Every structure is written in structure tokens, then in C-alpha cells.
Amino acid sequence: MSLDVSPALLEQAERGEVDEADFVDCVRTSLPYAWEMISSLVAQLKVDGGEFADNQTPPPDEQARGQLLRALASDAIRGALQRHFGVRLAFQNCHRVAVFPLDASADERLARFTSVRGQLLNQSPELRDC
């Protein structure tokens, strides 16, 4: 799963200066499932409040799963998405995406979510091959 990089954005990268808004737009158009997942979780967090919002529903297919993995495994993509949406992203297994506010109020919950214990407690046989 690669980004669909326009010639103009590639030219920016070759010159050394990349506008992050252009990069974020490339991510949005290249990884629509991941973008929609993160966007909807950010909206849920804003509406519902609380310490975090997460998704526990597996992606509908391997292409969607690949988009989530690409978005969250790449430091550049993940960092750009966090800055764009103003949240911290966390990821477990192959599909459990969570968004946390930037302020310190969610630090403890984020630490529990991203802990070894949290990862182990989120395992299930259905997700073994995801």
C-alpha cells in the first residue's frame, strides 16, 4: 500500500521543502479508509468527550486493513495526522485505532492503552491472522 503521490508533491520533496497540508491531502486521498476511520474517531471524541475514542470493528477487507497499517506504522504519516487532527493516535492489533486528546488529562489512559498489559488483554483468537 503506497501513497498516490502527485508529480507536484514529488517535485516538492525533491526540492527539499514539502508543505505538510499537501502531504496530509495526499494521505487523505491515498488512504481513504484510514482517513475516514481517524476522522470519525476525532469527531466522536469531540462530541462525546472523555479520555479517548476507539474503533474495535475489524476492517471490511485486506485493502482497508492495509490502509490502517500504512497510516499508523509510518512515523511521517502518523505524525502528520496527529498534527492535522490535534490528537494522539494509538494502535493495537491490526485494527484497533484510538484517538486521545493532546492535553495531559488522558496521559494515564493512553499509557494503559499502549502498555504491554493492554496489548495482551486485547488479544483474541479471531484476530490471530489479521
Image (cartoon, grey):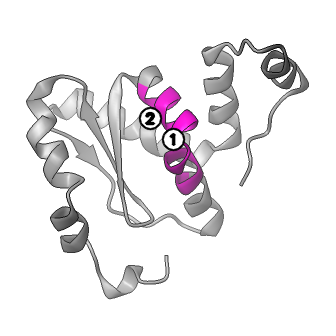
The one of 60 and 126 positioned closer to us in this rendering? 126
Q: Which residue is mark 1?
A: 36
Q: Secondary structure at mark 2?
A: helix
At 76% from the left and 15% from the top, the residue drawn is 16
At 51% from the left and 41% from the top, the residue drawn is 36
**Residue lying farthest to the front in this orientation:** 16
Mark 2–mark 1 Cα distance, whole angstroms, equals: 5 Å
Q: Which residue is mark 2?
A: 39
Range drawn in magenta:
68-82
Three-letter residue code for mark 2: Ser
> Please, what is the dominant secondary structure of the magenta stretch?
helix
92 lies left or right of 39? left
For label 1, the crowd category at 10 Å Cα-Cα, with few meaning under 14, some 14 to 19 and many 20 or more, is few
Image location of residue 12, percent across then percent down: 81, 16
Q: Secondary structure at mark 1?
A: helix
Circles 2 and 1, Cβ within 8 Å, touching? The answer is yes
2 lies left or right of 103? right
Residue 71 located within the stretch drawn in magenta: yes
For label 2, the crowd category at 10 Å Cα-Cα, with few meaning under 14, some 14 to 19 and many 20 or more, is some
Residue 126 located within the stretch drawn in magenta: no
